[in-house]
Amino acid sequence: MTNENTQILRPKPRLPRLDPWSAGAVLIAAIVLMPIGAVLWIAATPAENIWPHLLATVLPRYLSTTLTLMIGVGALTAAVGTGAAWLLTMYRFPLSRLLDYALLLPLAIPAYIGAYALVDFLEYAGPVQGALRDAMGWQSARDYWFPQVRSVPAAMVVLAAALYPYVYLLARAAFREQSGCACEVARALGNGPWALFVRVGLPLARPAIAAGVALAAMETVNDYGTVSYFGVQTLTTGIFSVWLSGGNAGGAAQLSLVLLVMILGLVAVERAGRRNMRFHQTSRTQRPVAPIRLQGLRAWAATALCLVPFSLGFLLPVGVILGIALRNREAWFSPGLGRALANTLVSGGVAAVLTVSAALFVVYGIRLAGQRLPRLLLPVTTIGYAAPGAVLAVGLLVPLAALDQRIADLVLRVSGHDPGLILTGTPAALVLAYCVRFFAIAQGAVDSAFDRVSPSLPMAARSLGRSAGGALQAVYLPLMQRSVATALLVVFVDCVKELPATLLLRPFNYDTLATRVHEKASLENLGDAAPAAILVMLVGLAAVGLMARASR
């Protein structure tokens, strides 16, 4: 055969195969990202552009107060969480073993409940000022000076007392992973306790501390209950005011966009600060740090330092709210409490199941498909957790309301029956907001659980004729059931505590425990708010107990 007749066969370019796992992963990622895209669109195309008015009037105040809160809470959580983690890792003193886990308990107390308790404890009619007046013989507030309880500094303290466990948990793990040899060498070179912390402990734990501070800052920006109760005007309260009081969704979306840019900037700064930091163990055998037993005044000083954040973040809110609940026992039988509890269990339970199921599908589908697009989308879906609840509410309610109207018009034309608001008139929008906001938590737990399963086990199942879904059901899920259960519980607890998104997206006359606590406390009716607050705290304690058990 001559060269002229020879044809070079070249493979035809193949289109990427559309398998159900990849398609499903892309679809779920699109749903998670949809509220952020909606906020961008609404902010860019408002029906009435009030951005110049916001920029000239309230935006500077909202922005400065939000930044002040973020910086203050970040500094307090870094100092308290890191200091407590270092003391409990490096030293032994009275109650240290108990405090090691007790310092996690404030995670079970939402910041807004801590705010209600602090005001009740320190206000003019509270026990502290009452005892001062009795002891000093003062007759009225004009006779003495007392710090303003509802203020920005008080909001910082309340938020830091509720959020420092984020830093404490990560810093404690980082300190425990450090080699005892490094500490011994530093001591041999003449470094005292402070120099050992600054030169050895702090640099090695800095990435973990930065991650914890970033989480605390995100939760600070998301908070609405604390700042609204204290009368502190932040970007989150501004979104509520512009949307609900001013009736301007475009302005609310523009404020949401500013808030979202702040959060993304915070995440970018945190990651940039850790980019060039790498720490490795230099020895093959790693010895854990050997704690030093403190004696005398130093031992009790360490105990007192660790007791302060635990008392502010847990003992004070639990003690105050429990005392109010015991004094108002009839509030446990109020008709709205049972309905709020049922609504909370249903919406939070459905959202937890859907969120974890979606995370299982996405993570498993991406591992099976191996295609580039789903892999690129997976990290982006974590933006939902960075977006505050108020931002997600703006991004969900406006497009879902428009979709509701189209569905109702279509059903009315076809059947002659008006179905009403299917999405925004039911808890569906609220459940969707929970799924988007907490998808990153479920995804992280599921992804790490998949990593712990040996690849040979599903490969063996597939070689025996199991399908991809069969391998997931027969191999992965039985080995991952504890991790999946933990993810379900953590997502459910976060749904129970979530306040901003719930306030904006709940249907009319649909209360949850969180909204009931907020509404009753806003009316200064802590007697009726206390039972719901206790139920929220009990749910949170279940999750914290599970976390403490897992971190042993």
Image (cartoon, rainbow, N blue to C red):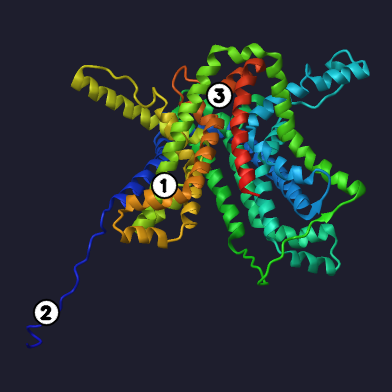
Q: Which mark identifies residue 7? A: 2
Residue at image position (62%, 37%) is 66
Q: Which amino acid does label 1 sit on?
A: Leu
Depth check, front residue: 143 or 284: 284
Q: Which of marks 3 and 2 is nearer the N terminus?
A: 2
Give residue 513's mark: 3
The amino acid marked with disc number 2 is: Gln
| Placement of 235 over or under 511, stated as above or below | below
Q: In which quarter of the image is the N terminus?
A: bottom left
- In the displayed structure, 506 sits above or below 33; it is above
Question: Is residue 262 in sight in this rendering?
Answer: yes
Judged by depth in the image, the label closer to the viewer, 2 or 1, is 1
**Residue 255 seen anywhere in this rendered image of the structure:** no
The tag earlier along the polypeptide, 2 or 1, is 2
Q: How far apart are marks 1 and 3 (CA)?
A: 29 Å
Q: Position of residue 171 (x, y in %)?
A: 68, 52
Residue at image coords 64%, 11% = 330
Rounded to the nearest angstrom, the CA distance separating label 2 from label 1 is: 49 Å
Mark 3 crowdedness (10 Å alpha carbons): few <14, some 14-19, many ≥20: many
Figure quadrant of residue 199? bottom right
Q: Name the residue under label 1.
A: 360
